[in-house]
Each structure stands twice: as structure tokens, then as C-alpha cells.
Image: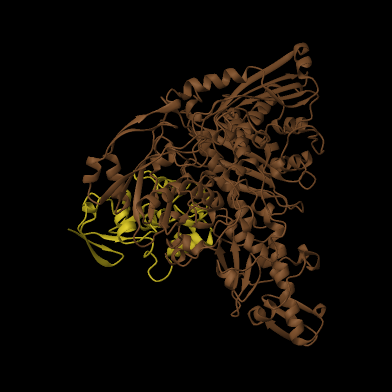
Chain colours: A brown, B yellow
Amino acid sequence: MSQIENVSRRRFLKGAFGAGALILAVRYIPPLLRHGQPADGQNDADRATFHPNLFVGIQRDGTVYIVAHRSEMGTVIRTTLPLVLADELDADFKRVKIDQAIGDQRYGDQNTDGSHSIRSFFDTMRDCGASARWMLIQGAAQQWNVPASECSTELHTVVHKATGRSLGYGELAAEAARLTVPKKEQIPLKKPSEWRYIGKGATSYDLEKLCTGKAMFGMDARVDGMVYASIERPPVFGGKVKTLDDQEALKVAGVHQTVSIDPFKPPAAFQPLGGVAVIADNTWAAFQGRKKLKITWDRGPNESYDSVEYKKELRETAHKPGRLVRNVGDSAKAFPTAKNVFEADYYVPLLAHAAMEPLVALAEFKDGKVTAWAPTQNPQAAQAIMSSELGIPKENVTCHVTLLGGGFGRKSKPDYVAEAAVLSKKLGRPVKVVWTREDDIKFDYYNAVAAMYLKAAVDDKGKPTAWLQRSVFPPISSTFDVNAVYGDPPHLQQGWTDLPYDLPNMRIENGPAQAHVRIGWLRSVANIYHAFGVQCFTDELAHRAHRDPVEYLLDLIGPPRTLDFTNVQYPNYGADYKTYPWETGRLRQVIEMVAEKSGWAKKKSRKGHGFGIAAHRSFLTYVATVVEVEVDDQGEIRIPRVDTAVDAGLVVNPEATRAQFEGAVVFGTSIVRSGEITAKDGVIQQSNFNDYPVARINEVPVQTNVYITESTAPPAGVGEPGVPPFVAAFCNAIFAATGKRVRDLPLSNNSIFG
Amino acid sequence: MVKLRVNGNDRSFDGDPDMPLLWYLRDVLGLTGTKFGCGMALCGACTVHKNGEAIRSCVTPMSAAADSEIRTIEDIGGNGLHPVQQAWMETNVPQCGYCQSGQIMQAISLLKSKPHPTDQEIDDAMAGNICRCGTYQRIRQAIKLAAGKIA
């Protein structure tokens, strides 16, 4: 609790960074982030004796404060980025204390999604650490009256070898603070061979707290005088309250009152959904009171949404010509003359995030200002939506970031934080809004449902001479623009635009779909369905041609080369294409690596025991995965082993990276086995882990082996890229063991035997 | 009036006897190490020990906790770390960590009844505890490591 109560200082913010910008894959990283921002006492780093830049402060006692401006939801990013700074600083990480930043545009982008924290801030962290180290060296040199070039650093200490003198960083803090911050060109960076932590990694800064119940999640935030709220939201997206009878609710012991929340004005974006909040002394009383509400609803424009009908519509659309995304050669000419043409439909339903910590936020409105504590991936968007919902300037909104009990993209959308702020303003006291698991599943920003149609003409060896692929899904942009029905480049690029095959004729299309729920990002996003379609269809073609799936996949990928996206909208995850080109050679390498490590050549699939492979690049990282499955006579599936080879460029924290890929296969197991959200009469039919099951310990791969490529390429993403190839490889392995194709996810809708 | 002991301290509660123990621990006592995940005993995040056995506090009404000895993650290691907590740290189990209080309390309970559990026994005992980050492989390793420490 002290963690939360000690950070109540407010900072006055300037300018605007609206929620609308978030969908455009434009990441704002201030060019001068490393230097010169005024220290204003917002956090311990700011208040430290020596505070050369935004991200680091050093005290006289040698304590080094490093700011974590990204959100911690299990990726260990709150440790790993500070570790990069500590390395260039040559600091002893045991003497580092991590300051969690509030939402503030001075840090640049803080939306912890898209697997880009290391990629976007690696250089910044290095510069910030190196410039502080440079200043400490200058300070010592002046004190000793020797040239700075004769001085160097050892752990947390500046030394002058010639005279055997040394001074600790704490002893030098005051001296260094008097110096001018150097220009970037002046700062020598370490050579990779000198790195102390980068490439070796560290365990989570919070590890012991996480194992002892002392870690502070959003669910654990408390302030004096707070009340608890549970909100009954419109059961259909876009609905609103018609009549309310709260008499029985108010009789529940501990319930204070009810408060109405206005419905949103389309587009929904990050606005609260509206409804009726029950305010109480404790969470349980609020839940109980809510059950006693009698509300009639105006169900609004989505009340006829039926996911069974919707699936048929998507599939029909996928069979009609769509909007061209990318074209090579002339498929339309090649198909009619082809001897052998194969086609297949694939389908992935809506998916919910279901992070273990249901959504929750605490907000206190006082004297025209609001302070919130929330498990958010996106504190600047939380600040922006609170500002607009309350009609107060952003300068008067502070969003503290707690630890997150999982995120997976859901906690990038701060509707729940806005709810707490709105209620606190109405009540004039701190309010903690607690979502139930049912709320969490029914009022998600779902990963889009997608239908895909693929068609290939093949030659005598089974190799495609023409290829057509068409995907149809309600786009994420529909959450921000009610008229959006086509996929936008940031999501089409995810495993669709960038089909990496070396074929003479390839046509890639996308069809329209109207959304009836809020659509949003979920761990690896559109890559989930696109990799599923492409990698399963490829496996189908390999088996039809009686060719080895690994050899076939490599044949389709073709020789090592850089893919050419001239005249194609390919945002490359917001990264510069020269720095992060799409290199088929790297995809080939991870395929070859995983084939070797898994012993693919010696493994023969037979009835009841199969192996599958898939490979995919997402978030600039190349991954290939081999899955082994056993299927018994009842169709029960066991996964004895998974092998995953990863080329994520330079990996700062290998242990955390391995953990992300281990977790990704579990996340993928849930998607394949049981991940499905459905709707009838506009109402989401799932509610909790009974009807939206996620993978348990007895259902997941028994052994997951992760192989990380040694690479000097610039760092790429690791949180998300493990999911897409696993999903496809798992389904390919099921085919190898059973002869049954899984084309419609999840597996629970398929009959494996009989 | 419900009387009980929580982490060795005598407590009494005169509120709604239907209130689940989870919310008493979290909202009344401020023991927030025990987590809310589902409210229906489906995920195990709320696992605590009642008279030494793992229970789901989210579906245990205060009336059913009367006259019992409750122990939570905050106190399970006494003044230090329980060997299971040590094993969790050495195996680097947690990712987000939200479910881990429940996982650890469940694992401690398992090792009391089965000091050297097989893979199957681990799966059976731990299948009620969901980890959405997917740390199951490390949970299995940590339980085996802890079994060695305790023995």
C-alpha cells in the first residue's frame, strides 16, 4: 500500500496525445528524450542528487533510480529496459531501484503493446545510461585533476588505474550534477563485448514480492475513504438503460447508492459503455446489490447480432472478390488453365483476453483534479479519456500504473479507468470499480472473428503456380470509426500482406465486415488467424503432394532474399524497413533450426501420433514451431512436446524471452482447444472459465523447448510472436495424427474421430 | 458473530455471514495477496489454507470459516520464505504473478499430502489453478524442486 500512497504527487502536463493516434501504429518517441528535460520532482529519479535525464537519478548513498515507463504485465519489461540503462551506466543492478512512471507524454510512447518496448527504447536507455556514466567520469577526473581519458568505470565506481584511486557513484553524484549533460555524439557507448547485463538478462525486479503476495496489482490499490463499485452494463453493445428500479439493491447491507453512467457516443473508442453502478462499503456488497437491480434496456442497433449467422456472412464475403491488398503476377489468368486447383476455408472466432486480474481501477476526484491507480498498459490513453470524460484538462489528470495481472492487449483500452473517474467525480470520493470475471468476458474488446478463403493451382510436384488468399474480419478501426469495414494496413500486414512465398502469381485480398462488438488487440492480433490460414493451407498442399511439410515449406519460401513491398502498403510494425527488412533467409534458418532440434527428419507421424510445423514472422521476429501430439481413441489430445526456434535479433533478456515463448504456446493451446466467444440476440453467451475455458496444467504441452538464435540484428518483439506459428503447427500435428483437418477453430467444434 | 484465526491472529466478524472469506481477507483485513479471479472456484487465484488444507476462499462463506485457522500467502513462510516460495523463485516461475499466490498455496497443500508427487499427481492437484500467462511447465519444475527441499 505504501507504494501507492507515496506516489501521489501531481505533475502538470502539456499538449495532447489523443487516443485516436493509438491505432495508427505511429509511435511518438521524442528525439531529445535522452537529455535536458527538467527535473520536477515527480518521482525518486527526478528528486535524486544527480539527475542527468528523464530515466535515471543517483543519490549520494549510491542508490540508482531508474524509471520504468512501460507497464509490467509479466514480460519483465519493467526490469529489462532499466537493465539496459544500468549496463551502459556500469551500475550494480542490486543497487538499482525501479521507479514506475505515471502516464506522461514526456516519456514518449507508453502504450505497452505491439511487442516493441525493447525495439523502441533500447537506444534511448543506452544513451541515458552512457551519458550519466560519462558525467560521473568527468566529475571524478576533475576531482582528481587528471584527464578523463585516463579514468574508467568498474561496477558502480569510477577508477583511475594509474594512481589506484576510486570513487563510488554516490560519492560523485553531487559533483556530476554540476556538469552539463553531453551531446549524444560525445557519449561513448560500450562495445557489445563489454556488456554486463545485455544478452545475459536478469530475473524480475518484483520476483520475491510476486511469490509472497506483497506485489501491488491494480486489484490491490487502496486509499482512505474509498468506496467500491460494480457496474451493470448494457447487455448488448450500444444499448442503454430504459428504466431502473434500485429499491431492492439499496436494501442490501453495505450498499450506499446507485449511480447511472451515460452511454457512449459512437464511436465507442475508450469511453465507458454506460449502465448503472452500485456503490458499497466492500466489493461483495456491491456485487450483491447489483444482482438486485431491476433494469429494462433499450438494446440498440446490435440486438440482432448472431454469431452463427455472422459466420455464414463472413464466409460468403470471403468467396466474393475483395479489395486488393497485394498482387504478384496474374492469378486470374493462371487459375483457369491450371489442372489441379485446391481451395479451403478457415475460420477463427472472436477471442476474449481473460487476463487473470479482471479489470479494475481506482480514481479520486478532488478539487477539479483526478488521480487514478490502474493496471493499464496505456496510461497516456487513460489520462486522455479521463480528461475528456470529466471535461477537465489533461494537466489535471494523473494516472499511476500498478502491476498488471496479465494484459494481453485488453488493458491498453482504458474504458474501465474512465468509469472509475466518472463515478468519483459524481460521488466526490475515491471509487474503486471492480469488474467481475463475467464483466471481463462479456465486455471485452475482442480479437476479431475472421473467415479466410485460400485457393492454389499446383504443378505436377504440387508446387503452387497461382495463389489466392482472401480474409474477412471486422477491423479494429471500427472501434474508432463506425464506418470502418475493411482491414487497415497495420492489421493486414500481420501475416497477410507479407505472404513470404516465392510464387509467380499471388493475389492477396480483403473483404468487408461490419462489427457488432468492440474489436481490439489481443496478443499477436491478426497474426493469429492469418498464420492459421496460410500455414495450415500450406500444410494441406504439402500432404496432397505427398511431400515432407518442412521441405515443402522451404520450397515455397524460396531462396534467401529481402521481400519487396514497393507500391504495397506494408507498415512493417512501424519500424524502418532498412533496419528491419523482411528476410526470408532468417525464416528459413529458424525452420531449419527447429527441424534439427526437434529431430523432424527421424519423426514419422502415424495414427494417433503426429508432428506438425509452421513458421511465421510477426513483430519483426521470425519463429518456427514443431508440435507433437498424441490422440487417443476418444479423441483426447495430449501434447508431449513443442520445439520453437526464434530469431528476435539481439535478445537482451534470454530467460524472460524463453518464458514468453513458453507462455505463448499455452496461450495458443487455449485458442486451439476452446477459445470461442459467441453472441445471440446481440448478447455475448460466455461468462466465466466454465464456458470460456482456458488451458489448464493437464492440457498444455508437457515440454516446451525454446531455441534462441544468436543474432546481431537489431532487437525485435518477443511477447507475441510465439502464438501464431504454434496455433497452426498444433492443427497440422492433429492432421498428421488423425487425418482430420481443423479448419474452423476451436477444436471443441470439431470431431476428431468419427 | 464469526470468530476465526487468520495468520495466527484472533479475529471476529459481525457482517454478512454469506460474505466469502476472500472479500473479508481483502477488503476488511487488507490482506490483498489472496486474489480474486473468477468468484466461482474455477481458477484457484483465491486459494488459502483452512486448517492446513487448500480451499477456494471466493466460495467459502464466512459462516463456513467460523472457528477455523486460516493461513494466507502473506504468512505461509513465517518470517522467511517457505521452501515452495524459494523453489518458485529459483525456477523463476511468475510472469504477471497474479495467480501465483493461489498456485503456491495449492502446491504447499499438495506436498503435505504427497511429498514426492508424480507428474500425474501434480496435474491432478494443480488443474484447478489457472495461469493465463502459461507458467505451467515451470510450476511443475518448481514443485519437484520444492519436494527435494522439503525432504
When the figure is inspected, residue A58 is found, relative to residue B37, above or below; the finding is below
Give the number of callouts. Answer: 0
Examine the image and state in which quarter residue A505 appears. Answer: top right
| Quadrant the N terminus of chain A occupies | bottom left
Percent x, y of residue B83? 44, 64
User: In which quarter of the view is residue B84 placed?
Assistant: bottom left
Q: Left or right: A473 with respect to A684?
A: right
In the image, is B128 to the left or to the right of A150?
left
Task: Give percent across and percent down for residue A446.
Answer: 51, 36
Give whichever of A244, B45 is nearer the camera.
A244
Q: Nearer the viewer, residue A122 or A458?
A: A122
> Residue at horizontal 32%, vertical 51%?
A283
- Tell me, yes or no, if residue A193 can be seen here: yes
Res B59 visible: no
Q: Is residue A585 above or below residue B60?
A: above
Residue occupying the point 55% across, 55% down: A71
Query: Nearest the camera: A68 or A485?
Result: A485
The x, y position of residue A280, in whole percent, is: 30, 51
The vertical placement of B96 against A597, above or below, is below
In depth, the one of A46 and A718 nearer the eye is A46
Q: Quadrant of residue A145?
A: bottom right
